[in-house]
Structures are given as structure tokens and as C-alpha cells.
Image: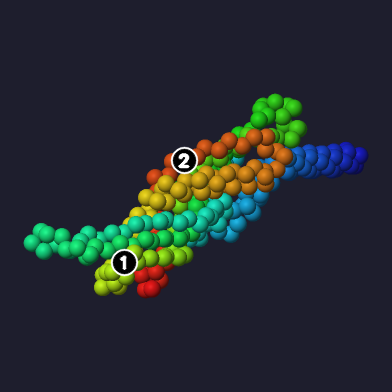
Amino acid sequence: MISSIMTFVLMLGAIFAVGVIGTGILMLIMYLMVKDGTKAAFNAIERFFGPGCKVSTGNHSMIVRQVVPILEIGTARGEFDHSYGWKKQKLRVLGIPIPLTEKEAECRHSFLVTAGFDLKTQVCRFDFLPVNSPFSLLGIFSPKSYNVKVTVPRAKILSVETTGVKIEDRSGWFDFWNALTEKDRHDILDEMFAQTRSHVERTGRGLLIEAMQRLEGGLRTIMPQSVRSIEFVWMENTSEFDFALSGTEKALGQ
């Protein structure tokens, strides 16, 4: 009888000990997960990019993909003017130029340029590199810190929208019959719009730099204390100036 009671007590003690040990292990795992630091960073990054992006995580890394046509994160906008002098040579008869038959016009093209990021074909990747050694006993019980490497494509011109066009006919009172025709105006606009891409390449590069600075500054601001440093690796973007010009139909219809 006494032996049975002792066996029962020992069994209860063993069960209790296993329960305590199991609870301790579970609490330790939960503690290590909470103090890991990546979860807070992942949540902050996901909120930063918002519903326009889809994120995936695993093995101390996070990948951000774009799911909307235009991503507003880090965008920079600027208004530009392009002055353009148009000239149509004199008519010729049998190779001889006819006086007072040339045409000239002064043109001004105003447009809004938007620079930002395209994460549909190229993704933004975050790699969290632990600062503390995982094999160190001190590292197990102290909060983990990370250096973060962010790999992201360089900014590009997302859109160029025509906001205004002005065409000034340079014909004088003495050649009033030589005024611009509707076809002349359409030809002028076609030539002007064809020059827009090269003009944006010369004047819009500052917007690319501004967009990259906006994205970098925003991400540095939202990182938790577990992140010690952030390194940005900007990938080359061969489509920096591969944009569509909008608003031309309205201008051509004027």
C-alpha cells in the first residue's frame, strides 16, 4: 500500500516537473521571439509600404512587391517648361526660294514630372544580419540587434503629364497670309513632344535623387531600436526614362 502511494506521488512529481520544464521552455521561446526584433521591424516596414505592396518574410529577410499600378512611396514631383523654336523653310519653285513664305513660331511646353519606384518587375529586399553571435550565452539572453541591408532598384520617371502648351505665331503684318495653319500647329506639337524625353533626361535627374532620398529617409525613421544600422544597395534601373507622356491628346485638340 505504501509502495503504491509512493509510486503515485513520484508520478505526480514527474508530471509536475515535466510541466514546469515545458512551460519554461515555451516561455523562453516566446521571449526569444519577442526580443528577436525582426517582428517589430517587419510590421513597421509593412505599414510603411501600405496596401499597395505585398510582403513575404523568412529566414531574417523580407521581400516587398508592388501590387498597384503606381506606388506613391517616395515619389517626387516637379513642374518643368520646355521652350521650343519652330521654323518652316521657304517654299521653293524650281529650286528657287520664294520670299516671305517661311514660317516661325515660339512654343512653350509645360509638364508635370513624377519620379518614384517600380517594384513590379524588381523587388525591394531587406536582409537582417544579427550583430550578436547566436552561439554566445550572453547573446541568447540579451536583446538581439541587427544590421539591415536594403536592396532596392533606383528610382525612375513614372509619368510625364502635359499641363500647358503655348504656340506664338511669329508672322508679321506684312506676311499675314503666311499664318500658321491647323496642320502646322499639329506638326509643331508632334516635334515638341518628341523632344520631351531628352529634355526630361537633362532636367529631371534631380527628381530621381529626391525620390531615393525620400525612400531612404522614411525607412530609416521607422526602424525599431533593434536595428543598429541600415545599408542601402541601389540596383541599376535601365528603364529610368521609359515613361509615357500623357495630356497630349488635349493639347492636340486645342
Q: What residue is shown at x 52% (from left), y 40% (from top)? A: 151
Where is residue 32? Give x, y as percent: 72, 39
Q: Say which of 27 and 250 sits in front.
A: 250
Position of 242 with respect to 149 (left or right) is: left
The vertical placement of 79 against 61, above or below, is below
Q: What residue is shown at x 63% (from left), y 52% (from top)? A: 48
Q: What residue is shown at x 42% (from left), y 60% (from top)? A: 109
In the rendering, which numbered label is found on residue 115? none
Q: Which residue lies under the disc numbered 2? A: 235
Q: Nearer the viewer, mark 2 or mark 1?
A: 1
The vertical placement of 23 against 108, above or below, is above
How many angstroms separate mark 2 from mark 1 (CA)? Answer: 51 Å
Q: Label 1 is placed on what type of residue?
A: Ser
- The N terminus sits in image quarter: top right
Position of 174 with respect to 140 (left or right) is: left
Where is residue 63? Give x, y as percent: 54, 47
Where is residue 212? Give x, y as percent: 54, 45
How many circles with numbers are drawn on the protein?
2
Q: Which residue lies under the disc numbered 1? A: 171
The reply to whether residue 200 is in sight is yes
Residue 195 falls in image quadrant: bottom left
- The C terminus sits in image quarter: bottom left
Q: What residue is shown at x 45% (from left), y 60% (from top)? A: 110
Q: Label 2 is placed on what type of residue?
A: Met
Where is residue 73? Give x, y as percent: 57, 53
Q: Say which of 26 and 175 sits in front.
A: 175
The vertical placement of 109 against 128, above or below, is below
Position of 50 with respect to 120 (left or right) is: right
